[in-house]
Amino acid sequence: MANIKLLTQEQKEALKTVINESKKLAKVEGSVLSEYMEAIGYEIVEISPLDLFNRLAGLKTDENKEDKKTDE
């Protein structure tokens, strides 16, 4: 069996703080990256996780279906 140590309340609060600060830092770094990418000519587009998965897997997405309709 795995030896599991339960966290104390103080450790839980410290862990929450670390996670929240990490999220804030990621947002700042992400926004700086977005600004840089836009400055060098990339278009930033929001995409749903499902569409991203489908694109990476090579599956058809709603956007691909629209592209095919306009190509015809």
Image (tube, helix red, strand yellow):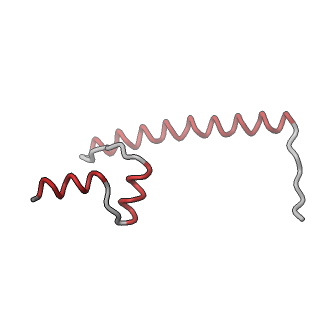
Whether residue 18 sits left or right of residue 26 in the image: it is: right
Residue that appears at 89% across and 51% down: 5
What residue do we see at 50% from left, 37% from top? Answer: 27
Q: Is residue 42 above or below residue 25?
A: below
Quadrant in which the N terminus appears: bottom right
Whole-percent x, y for residue 4 in the image: 88, 54
Q: Is residue 20 left or right of residue 64?
A: right
- Left or right for 40, reference 17: left
Image quarter for residue 32?
top left
Residue 35 drawn at (x, y percent): 35, 38
Q: Nearer the viewer, residue 37 or 56?
A: 56
Q: Quadrant of the C terminus?
A: bottom left
Outermost residue toward the left?
72
Total numbered labels: 0
Q: Identify which residue is drawn at 38% across, 59% down.
A: 54
Name which residue lies at 88% across and 46% down. 6
Picture coordinates of residue 53, whole percent (x, y): 42, 58
**Residue 18 point in image, percent of width and height:** 69, 38
Q: Nearer the viewer, residue 14 or 1?
A: 1
Placement of 72 over or under 34, stated as above or below: below
